[in-house]
Amino acid sequence: MTYNIDSSIPGWMSERDLGILAKISSLCPEYSSMLEVGAFLGRSTYPIYANKSKASTLTVVDTFEPTAEYNPDSVRLATKMHGDPDKIEQALSASRASMSWQAGFELCLGEKICSKLDIHACSSQDYVKTTDFDLVFIDGGHDQETVQHDIDKFISPTNLLIGDDFGMKYRRFKGLINAVAISKLKHNRTLLCPADSRLWILVPNSGHWYHTLGNLL
Ligand SMILES: C[S@@+](CC[C@H](N)C(=O)[O-])C[C@H]1O[C@@H](n2cnc3c(N)ncnc32)[C@H](O)[C@@H]1O
């Protein structure tokens, strides 16, 4: 089975992790609702979008704000990203011109895909949740408080939560790792951390995701 990923889109996720996201998205039942927190230029959005069933919906929440950490003028930021060099330059220049990463996100994903997304340019804290999502990908703020907030806000008894940056640079992502470990205990979930991957996955104890991933263990 092959999955759709687009590694030309700028970002930091490895092709292996884009493939895992693609596979998880393809395992969602029809009519699922999916949420991505922290999309940046759409590198992770694409595999979730391109491998979901047509009837499933994808909501995207990102501040899209240029900040000291995400500064479109930063040469360091640009050189550390994976992706097609021309696309990186175009995305940075569009985001600089409009003073929002949303312009780069739209450029990288294209109008056809963006018109099918429910995009919210706000923080996960300000986002008004009106429904539970079946699949949630968390890659927004990486400090402990924000990761804990995102998990507690979006977890439901049967949904699957996935997030990025568990591991490798332990010091840098210590807060994130703490929040995930605390959540594993607090919400009594199975925690999966695949090899050669930075993804963390909290699997519920009932429902579709339990039967697909959790009851193997
Ligand atoms: C690591 S980047 C996301 C990378 C993206 N998932 C990818 O694979 O290319 C983090 C993103 O989260 C956004 N962000 C940071 N804090 C946030 C918050 N509290 N709520 C929503 N988005 C946030 C930033 O604007 C940035 O675009």
Image: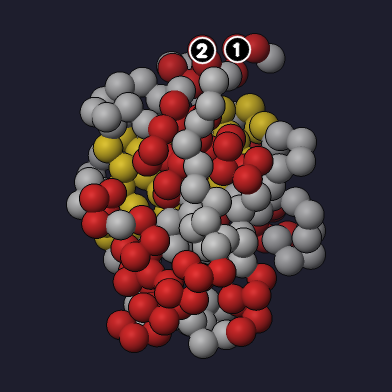
Check the image and report above or below for 168 versus 99: above
Q: Quadrant of residue 25?
A: top left
Q: Which residue is drawn at 46% across and 23% down?
A: 27
Q: Foreground: 1 or 76?
A: 1
Check the image and report above or below for 26 versus 217: below
Q: Does residue 158 appear in the picture of this structure?
A: no
Q: Foreground: 26 or 144?
A: 26
**Image quarter hosting the C terminus:** top right
> Which amino acid type corresponds to the residue marked 2 in the rendered image?
His
Labels 2 & 1 near each other (Cβ < 8 A)? yes
> Which amino acid type corresponds to the residue marked 1 in the rendered image?
Asn
Q: Is residue 70 left or right of residue 191?
A: left
Q: Is mark 2 on a helix, strand or loop?
A: helix
Q: Does residue 206 appear in the picture of this structure?
A: yes
The label shown at residue 215 is 1
Q: In which quarter of the image is residue 172?
A: bottom right
Check the image and report above or below for 186 versus 79: above
Check the image and report above or below for 175 versus 156: below
Q: Is residue 63 left or right of residue 22?
A: left
Q: Foreground: 173 or 11?
A: 11
Q: In this view, does 114 lie to the left or right of 34?
A: left
Q: Give the Cα distance between marks 2 and 1.
A: 6 Å
State the residue position of label 2: 211
Q: Which residue is drawn at 38% across and 70% down?
A: 104
